[in-house]
């Protein structure tokens, strides 16, 4: 396992930490409750993180 593969834990930490950090019912972001907006952000973070890991793997020349 290459060191940059540990980046995949970031979106997981964002989703698992959401109920403790982002549980604000009264706050809205673009009309969404803050917790739902946080989850949407985590999905986008997951896509960006996986693209970064893919880029780093290709640059390493690894066949994982």
Image: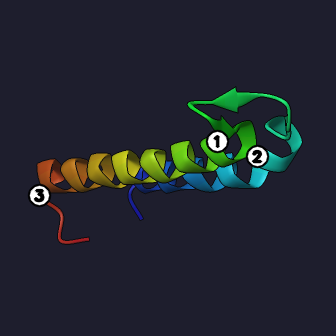
Between discs 2 and 1, the one toward the N terminus: 2
Label 1 secondary element: helix
Q: Position of residue 42 (x, y in %)?
A: 55, 48
Left or right, 39 with reference to 64: right
Seen from the viewer's position, the closer of residues 42 and 3 is 42
Label 3, on which residue? Answer: 61
Q: Residue at x 39, y 48 (%)?
A: 49
Q: Along the horizontal axis of the image, is 7 left or right of 31?
A: left
Q: Which residue is mark 1?
A: 38
**What secondary structure is marked by label 2?**
helix
The residue at 56%/31% (across/down) is: 30
Residue 6 versus residue 20 in the image, above or below: below
Name the residue carrying label 2.
18
Residue 26 position within the rendered picture, expressed as x and y whole percent measured from the top left: 85, 31
Q: What is the spatial separation of the Cα atoms under label 2 and label 3, in whole angstroms?
A: 35 Å
* For discs 2 and 1, the disc positioned in front in the rendered view: 1
Circle 1 crowding by C-alpha within 10 Å: few under 14, some 14–19, many from 20: many
Q: Please give left or right for residue 57 compared with residue 32 in the image.
A: left
Q: Quadrant of the N terminus?
A: bottom left
Which residue sits at x=67%, y=48%? 36
Q: CA distance from mark 1 to mark 3?
A: 34 Å
Quarter of the image for residue 52 reads top left
Q: Residue furthest front?
A: 31
Residue 37 occupies which quadrant of the picture?
top right
| Residue at the spot 49% in from the left edge and 55% down from the top edge | 8
Q: Single out the mark in the foreground, 1 or 3.
A: 1
């Amino acid at each position: 396992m290459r060191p940059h593969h540990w980046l995949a834990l970031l979106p997981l930490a964002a989703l698992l930490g959401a109920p403790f950090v982002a549980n604000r019912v009264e706050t809205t972001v673009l009309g969404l409750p803050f917790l739902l907006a946080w989850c949407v952000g985590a999905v986008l973070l997951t896509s960006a993180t996986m693209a970064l890991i893919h880029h780093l793997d290709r640059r390493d020349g690894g066949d994982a």
